Amino acid sequence: MFSDRKSIKEVEEGLKLSPKFDKNGLIPVVTTDYKSGKLLMHAYMNDEALKLTILKKEAHYYSRSRKCLWRKGATSGFVQKVKHILIDDDQDCIWLQVSVTGDASCHVGYHSCFYREIKVIKGKTKLSFTEKEKTFDPEDVYGDSPNPTIL
């Protein structure tokens, strides 16, 4: 499915998919809502996740914290149906445009994983919420499943 990276010209302007995975075998992915354009999340894929995403038209990622492949929505039901898969100029970053079943993408319960803005108030850095309400209650959806956030 993936071609070897043989020339800059082919990588940058050719028609062959030649993704550049990092030394850990991962490629970064940004995921946006297909209709609104809102940034939903940033994650990583290994080659298996990218292949599955292309073939099944549902977002698959590689969890660095859990060290495993995962299909978005497998537990929560908030499946990301892929509308478009784009790759950047040097093929080292993926952009997914998706529609989300259930209208949530963040395990914390918000629509987007980017639900806070960094602000400087009186010389101090603070976080300000950009989403006021959660789309769902994580405890209802995930129960006692381990939280993927690692301290």
Image (spheres, rainbow, N blue to C red):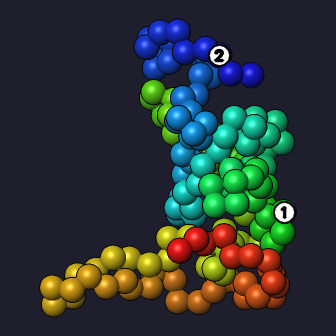
Between residues 46 and 51, which one lies in front from this camera angle? 46
Query: Please, what secondary structure does the residue beneath circle 2 have?
Result: loop
Q: Residue at x 54, y 51 (%)?
A: 30
Q: Which amino acid does label 2 sit on?
A: Ser
Q: Residue at x 81, y 84 (%)?
A: 144
Look at the picture and state if 119 lies above or below 86: below
Quarter occupied by residue 41? bottom right
Measured as percent of width and height from the top left, residue 135 is found at: 68, 83
Residue picked out by circle 1: 74
First in sequence, mark 1 or 2: give its number: 2
Look at the picture and state if 42 lies above or below 90: below
Measured as percent of width and height from the top left, residue 93 is found at: 51, 39
C-alpha separation, residue under disc 1 versus residue under disc 2: 30 Å
Q: In this view, does 119 lie to the left or right of 6?
A: left
Q: Which amino acid does label 1 sit on?
A: Ala
Between residues 118 and 38, which one lies in front from this camera angle? 118
Q: How many labels does the image show?
A: 2
Measured as percent of width and height from the top left, residue 65 is found at: 63, 61
Measured as percent of width and height from the top left, residue 125 is found at: 26, 82
Q: In this view, does 119 lie to the left or right of 148?
A: left
Mark 2, Cα crowd under 10 Å, few <14 / some 14-19 / many 20+, is few
Look at the picture and state if 14 lies above or below 97: above
Q: Residue at x 53, y 63 (%)?
A: 38
Question: Which residue in the rendered view is the most extreme toward the left?
Answer: 123
Residue 81 makes an appearance in the image:
no
Quarter occupied by residue 143? bottom right
Using the image, tell me which numbered label, if any, was put on residue 3: 2
Q: Are marks 1 and 2 in contact (CB under 8 Å)?
A: no
Query: Please, what secondary structure does the residue beneath circle 1 have?
Result: loop
Q: Is residue 79 left or right of residue 3?
A: right
Q: Residue at x 46, y 20 (%)?
A: 12
Mark 1, Cα crowd under 10 Å, few <14 / some 14-19 / many 20+, is few
